[in-house]
Amino acid sequence: MATRGFNAHAPKVLAALRVMTALLYVEHGMIKLFGFPAGAPPGKVPLMGLFGVAGVLEFVGGLLILLGLFTRPVAFLLAGQMAVAYFMAHAPSSPYPAINHGEPAILFCFIFLYLSVAGPGAWSIDGGRR
């Protein structure tokens, strides 16, 4: 019986995970596209480069995840982006995530992979369209 009480909150907690992950992800895109917040690496980058494409995916994809719109396919795409980012930018410097600073990429990858399977949870446009 106790687990039923916890299960009743699962869609709302899933939505909270989706929203907080999306807000953090949008911030990564804002750094690359707009240089905001100032001083955050890598700062504003050229749009027609690998970091620029990553910034567009992070900003637009993050907003879609935030709204819960096309959550499953967008989350799957972003999980792939984070896997590529980890193996291109982090893994070559060290096999250890604590040394290569790849923990955020790994966490984003697996959270997005989970969202692609679990869906958006409560409070989403996808949920309203069903």
Image (cartoon, rainbow, N blue to C red):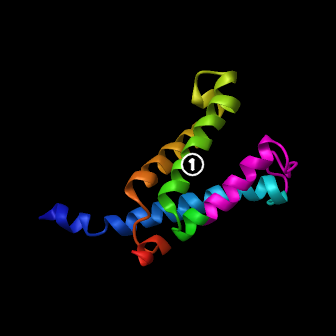
The residue labelled by disc 1 is 77
- Dot 1, crowdedness within 10 Å: few (<14), some or many (≥20)? some
Residue at 47% of width from left, 60% of height from top? Answer: 17
Q: Is residue 53 left or right of residue 115?
A: right
What stretch of residues is rendered in magenta? Answer: 38-63
Q: Quadrant for the N terminus, please.
A: bottom left
Residue 71 in picture, x, y percent from top left? 50, 61
Element type at marker 1? Answer: helix
Q: Quadrant for the C terminus, please.
A: bottom left
Residue at 58% of width from left, 37% of height from top? Answer: 83
Residue 11 in picture, x, y percent from top left? 35, 67
Residue at 84% of width from left, 51% of height from top? Answer: 47
The answer to which image quadrant residue 122 occupies is: bottom left
Residue at 16% of width from left, 63% of height from top? Answer: 2
Q: Amino acid at mark 1?
A: Leu
| Picture layout, residue 29 above or below residue 69 | above
Taking the image as drawn, is residue 41 in sight?
no
Seen from the viewer's position, the closer of residues 123 and 69 is 69
